[in-house]
Every structure is written in C-alpha cells, then in structure tokens.
Image: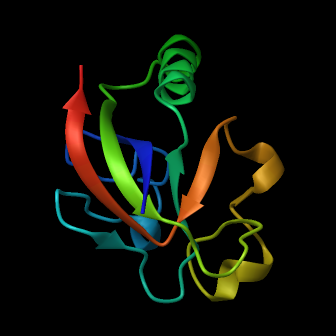
Amino acid sequence: MKKGFKIVTKELKSYVMDFKELACVQYSKKWAKRRKGCGPLAVFSTEKAAKKFIDFEMSFNGAVSPRLFECRYTVPKVRCKGLWDSAEAKRDYIYGRAYLPKGTVFADRVKLVKEIK
C-alpha cells in the first residue's frame, strides 16, 4: 500500500473521469476498486503534482470545486499503458500515459484518508 493524492468532485467521484458513467467510481474512506472490465484508477504520487494540476484546471478550464485528499492505494499487478472506461475500449485508451498529468500513477484500489484544504 502506498501514499498518494486523489482529486475528486464534491460528490467524491473521479474529478477527471466523471464525464464517463462507466468510469465513475464512488470514493470514500473505504477501499474503492476499479469496475470490472475498466482500466486502472489514477492518483497523484505527490501533493505538489496534484495541486499543480488543480491550479492548471482552475486557470485554464474554470474547474468547479475540486477536492484534494491524501489517499492510500495499491499498485496494479499488471503494468498499465493508460486509462480506459470499458473492456471494449481497452484498445483505444481514453488517456494514454503520455497524455496524463505529470505525477499520475495507476492504482487497483484507492482509499481516501483525509481532505487537504
């Protein structure tokens, strides 16, 4: 289990992937797992990288109230090349590793620990 940082919406869903219903995972202080057939979950390896992404989103996209949490996560057993939202889309990644924000790491399970203000 590793320490990371997760950005979520006010409803505790993935901030980046909340536009894809299949990809939405409800996060909490219990372990959240990726849905069957879906790609890995994503977290940031450092608080600095997560805050940099939030700053970018707020200035560039006018992001709406992202929430930042310290989290614990488990590393995937299989090496991941990107994020996808279903088994059918596995060939066509929504985001390949090269397009993900700096500091992104993949996870099989994520548990929120505490909110960072």
Which residue is at 52% across, 22% downward? 48
**Relative to the observer, which residue lies in front, 78 or 53?**
78
Scheme by which the image is coloured: rainbow
Q: Is residue 7 left or right of residue 60?
A: left
How many numbered callouts? 0
Which residue is at 51% across, 15% downward? 55
As drawn, the residue found furthest toward the top would be: 59
**Relative to the observer, which residue lies in front, 62 or 111?**
111
Which quarter shows the C terminus?
top left
Q: Position of residue 18 (x, y in %)?
A: 41, 53
**Relative to the observer, which residue lies in front, 76 or 84?**
76
**Relative to the observer, which residue lies in front, 86 or 47?**
47
Q: Position of residue 60 (x, y in %)?
A: 59, 16
Q: Position of residue 110 (x, y in %)?
A: 36, 62
As drawn, the residue found furthest toward the front would be: 1
Q: Position of residue 37 (x, y in %)?
A: 53, 88
Q: Is residue 105 above or below residue 5?
A: below
Q: Is residue 19 above or below residue 66?
A: below
Q: Quadrant of residue 24?
A: bottom left
Q: Is residue 116 above or below residue 76?
A: above
Q: Is residue 115 left or right of residue 57?
A: left
Which residue is at 62% across, 45% downward? 104
